[in-house]
Structures are given as C-alpha cells and as structure tokens.
Image (spheres, rainbow, N blue to C red):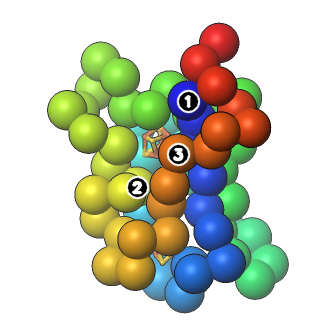
Amino acid sequence: MAYKITEECTACGLCEPECPVQAISEGDPVYTVDASVCIECEGHFDEPQCAAVCPVAAAVPDPDHPKK
Ligand code: SF4
Ligand code: SF4
C-alpha cells in the first residue's frame, strides 16, 4: 500500500530527503506522495521512512492505492 500525506502536514520538509525513491515532493499547501512511485520503503528500510520521521504523523497508508 502506498503512503500518502494528510492535511496534518506542516510542510516541514523532513520526509522528502528520506524517501529512497524520491516519491515525495513539495506540494501546496502540503507535501505529496506519488503513489505510483512509493514502494513503502520495501527493500530499503524496515519501516516507511516518511511515517518514521514525520513529527505530526501526517504520512499514513493510503487505502486508495493498495499494493500493486
Ligand atoms: S513509504 Fe517510503 S517509499 Fe513511500 S513515500 Fe514514504 S518514504 Fe517514500
Ligand atoms: S515530515 Fe510530515 S509534516 Fe514534514 S513535510 Fe513530511 S509529511 Fe509534512
């Protein structure tokens, strides 16, 4: 399941450089995840890094984009 970034995002930018596949980009007003690129960090990290580093828990699983 891809991850997504919710309205809770404060656009702090912490998550963007942590994504191993550059799926995260700055949006307006919140950061966004490209669901077609996100691999849930599989093969790179034990847990989704965007969720791990986000101080406000804005990165969450996106049920609209289940595993391919
Ligand atoms: S779960 Fe991993 S691959 Fe997906 S957006 Fe977050 S950091 Fe990137
Ligand atoms: S770490 Fe969290 S609050 Fe910061 S830009 Fe990413 S999703 Fe938004």
Please identify, in this view, whether the residue under mark 1 or under mark 2 is nearer the observer: 1
Q: Amino acid at mark 2?
A: Cys
Q: CA distance from mark 3 to mark 1?
A: 6 Å
* 63 or 17: nearer the viewer: 63
Q: State the SS at label 3.
A: strand
* Local crowd size for mark 2, using a 10 Å CA cut-off: few (<14), some (14–19), many (≥20): many
Q: Quadrant of the N terminus?
A: top right
Q: Specify whether 60 is left or right of 51.
A: right
Q: Earlier in the sequence, mark 3 or mark 2?
A: 2
| Callout 1 touching callout 2 (CB < 8 Å) | no
Of the pair 61 and 34, the residue shown nearer to us:
61
Q: Residue 10: x percent and y percent?
A: 54, 87
Q: Earlier in the sequence, mark 1 or mark 2?
A: 1
Place of residue 47 in the rendered image (x, y in percent of width and height, measured from the top left): 26, 39
State whether residue 65 appears in this view.
yes
Is 37 drawn above or below residue 11 in the view shown?
above
Residue drawn at x 50%, y 70% is: 58
Q: Nearer the viewer, mark 3 or mark 2?
A: 3
- The crowd level at tag 3 (other Cα within 10 Å; few <14, some 14-19, many 20+) is some
Which amino acid type is shown beneath numbered disc 3?
Answer: Pro
Mark 2 within 8 Å of ligand 1, using the beta carbon = yes
**Which residue corresponds to the image point at 40% horizontal and 80% vertical from the top-left?**
56
Q: Are marks 3 and 1 in contact (CB under 8 Å)?
A: yes
> For mark 3, what is the residue?
61
Disc 1 crowd rating (10 Å Cα; few below 14, some 14-19, many 20+) is some
Q: Position of residue 60 (x, y in %)?
A: 50, 55
Q: Secondary structure at mark 2?
A: helix
Circle 1 residue = 1
Q: Which residue is denoted by mark 2 in the rendering?
A: 50
